[in-house]
Image: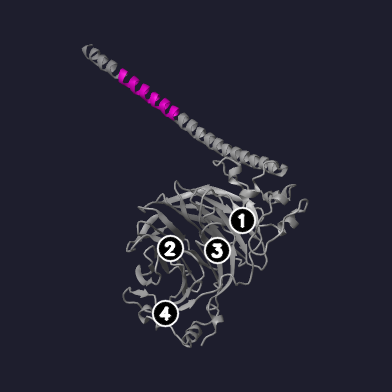
């Protein structure tokens, strides 16, 4: 019988979010995991043992999607507050805001060259943005209901999108046209993505189905029905041999795409699993859900030859059912139902290798300023609020093994190392503190700076428009003068013609 170490194992769990975990992504450098939540915050978890975690505050509503840039130096997040933010995943905590849509933004993703962003929204549109110019590029509008997800292909030539209109659409980024529409979804399409080679796309649905299409033939090649509730998210393994899915049935399932079967069912979440994601290498994957937890799993089936994995599975005392051979060269689409003998893994969630990490609060407390102002630069000095004269009054209960309180007068680096897990709202609830007053002034100055910058941009735009108007006006005047000259010449010509006619008879009489 194969060793349990050859199965996926729960490595760590992270607690820090105060609401459902809605999205997750690994940094390409393999050192960080980013998660977003219904608590309006984005958290960066460092995968090194005993490393600090960072909580970024800025969105005014639930975060719905996030993704690291290919270089790992930016994180894009989408929110129900109708905006997209670009964050720097560091102590500075800086972010740039895109006022992206007229309704909730459901997903955000980078192109593989890092130059573009694609967003999907409840306003029924898919929009593409320039990352470095920080501007809107174009919009794709053929969905007839909320758009739940949009992703770029590996080469950037295609965009796949899906939504509540029960369709999966494929767009050509050069012509901006919809080149294909897969409309045989049994319910709302919740998630869509390309495999790493770009030859297939998969979509999941609220009807608990997962479908895979071959883009070379535009045909449905696999259809899985392995969950007992809607599928919220899935992720392709970098090898394209496996796929993980998270469902409202509280489970994570691992599918063997080459054999066309379910091989693992992972238990551990106490509520719906809302997001799953493989790391870029594929040795780790994360899951997050309604229980506010982030679970980090490790697997090694990607590090062994595929035939070796199959042989190890054949040695089990309760082997899985034989594969569907027709999946290797499928003739017609067919369902794959959950098998009762699939391997069930029930980890003890609290018995993991690490305790909850220290959390450093970064970003801007939204209730400290008016809600209609969004600060462009979020100062890292917020962490220093804890070193003020009243910091000993702010200490409270923490999760895991974090105890004690913070003492005044410590330096910045020392204070960061001993930061406690406190809600940012609590930290900013002492208007009598001098540090708070100074910080509030700095925030207001940041808002004024941003406002002035926006006014300058609008003034520049107005000046450009006025120049265009003056040029058009000048051209119109020139055209009118030229037209007047032509009319005068024509009128002079017509005046001379009758005189000539009158003179002609007088000469004949003579």
Side of 274 where 497 appears, left or right: left
**SS under mark 2:** strand
Q: Is residue 283 above or below residue 319?
A: above
- Magenta-colored stretch includes residue 249: no
The answer to whether the residues at label 1 and label 2 have Cβ atoms under 8 Å apart is no
Specify which label sits upstream in the sequence, 1 or 3.
1
Question: How far apart, in angstroms, are the residues tagged by discs 4 and 1?
Answer: 41 Å
Q: Position of residue 72 (x, y in %)?
A: 59, 61
Q: CA distance from mark 4 to mark 2?
A: 22 Å
Disc 2 crowd rating (10 Å Cα; few below 14, some 14-19, many 20+) is many
| SS type, badge 4 | loop
The residue where tag 1 is placed is 55
Q: Earlier in the sequence, mark 3 or mark 2?
A: 2
Residue matched to label 3: 293
The mark found on residue 259 in the picture is 4
Q: Is residue 93 visible?
A: no
Disc 3 to disc 2, how far (Cα)? Answer: 24 Å
- Per the model, the C-alpha gap separating discs 1 and 2 is 28 Å
Above or below residue 371? Residue 152 is: below
Q: Nearer the viewer, mark 3 or mark 2?
A: 3
Q: Position of residue 295 (x, y in %)?
A: 55, 67
For the magenta stretch, what is the residue range?
476-495
Crowding at mark 4 (Cα within 10 Å: few <14, some 14-19, many 20+):
some
Label located before the other in sequence (4 or 1): 1
Q: Is residue 487 magenta?
A: yes
Residue at image coords 55%, 71%: 297
Q: Residue at x 37, y 80 (%)?
A: 324
């Amino acid at each position: 019988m194969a060793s349990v170490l050859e199965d996926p194992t729960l490595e760590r769990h992270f607690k820090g979010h105060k609401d459902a975990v809605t999205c997750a992504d690994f940094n390409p450098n393999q050192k960080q995991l980013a998660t977003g939540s219904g608590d309006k915050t984005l958290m960066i978890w460092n995968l090194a043992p005993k490393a600090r975690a960072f909580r970024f505050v800025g969105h005014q509503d639930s975060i719905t999607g996030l993704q690291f840039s290919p270089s790992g130096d930016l994180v894009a997040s989408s929110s129900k507050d109708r905006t997209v933010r670009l964050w720097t995943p560091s102590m500075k905590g800086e972010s740039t805001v895109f006022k992206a849509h007229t309704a909730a933004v459901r997903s955000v993703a980078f192109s593989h060259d890092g130059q573009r962003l694609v967003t999907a929204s409840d306003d029924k549109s898919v929009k593409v943005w320039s990352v470095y110019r920080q501007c809107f590029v174009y919009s794709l509008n053929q969905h007839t209901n909320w758009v739940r997800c949009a992703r770029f292909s590996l080469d950037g030539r295609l965009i796949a999108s899906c939504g509540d209109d029960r369709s999966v659409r494929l767009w050509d980024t050069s012509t901006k046209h919809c080149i294909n529409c897969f409309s045989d979804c049994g319910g709302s399409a919740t998630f869509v993505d390309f495999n790493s080679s770009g030859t297939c796309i998969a979509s999941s649905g609220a009807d608990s189905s997962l479908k895979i299409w071959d883009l070379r033939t535009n045909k449905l090649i696999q259809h899985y029905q392995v969950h007992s509730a809607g599928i919220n998210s899935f992720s392709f393994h970098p090898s394209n041999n496996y796929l993980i899915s998270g469902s409202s049935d509280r489970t994570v399932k691992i599918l063997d795409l080459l054999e066309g079967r379910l091989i693992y069912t992972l238990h551990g979440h106490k509520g719906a699993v809302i997001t799953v994601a493989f790391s870029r290498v594929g040795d780790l994957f994360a899951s997050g859900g309604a229980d506010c937890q982030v679970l980090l799993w490790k697997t090694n089936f990607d590090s062994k030859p595929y035939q070796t994995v199959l042989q190890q599975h054949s040695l089990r005392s309760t082997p899985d059912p034989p594969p569907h051979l027709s999946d290797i060269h499928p003739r017609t689409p067919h369902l794959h139902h959950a098998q009762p003998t699939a391997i069930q893994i029930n980890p003890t969630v609290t018995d993991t290798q690490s305790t909850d990490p220290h959390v450093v609060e970064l970003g801007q407390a939204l209730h400290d300023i008016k809600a209609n102002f969004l600060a462009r630069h979020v100062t890292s000095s917020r962490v220093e609020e804890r070193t003020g004269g009243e910091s000993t009054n702010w200490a409270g209960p923490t999760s895991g093994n974090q105890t004690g309180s913070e003492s005044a007068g410590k330096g910045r680096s020392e204070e960061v190392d001993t930061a406690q897990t406190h809600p940012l709202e609590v930290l900013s609830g002492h208007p009598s503190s001098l540090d708070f007053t100074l910080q509030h002034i700095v925030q207001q100055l940041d808002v004024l700076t941003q406002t002035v910058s926006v006014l300058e941009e609008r003034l520049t735009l107005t000046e450009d428009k006025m120049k265009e108007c003056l040029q058009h006006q000048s051209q119109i005047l020139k055209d009118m003068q030229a037209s007047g000259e032509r009319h005068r010449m024509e009128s002079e010509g017509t005046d001379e013609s009758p005189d000539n006619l009158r003179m002609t008879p007088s000469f004949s009489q003579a």
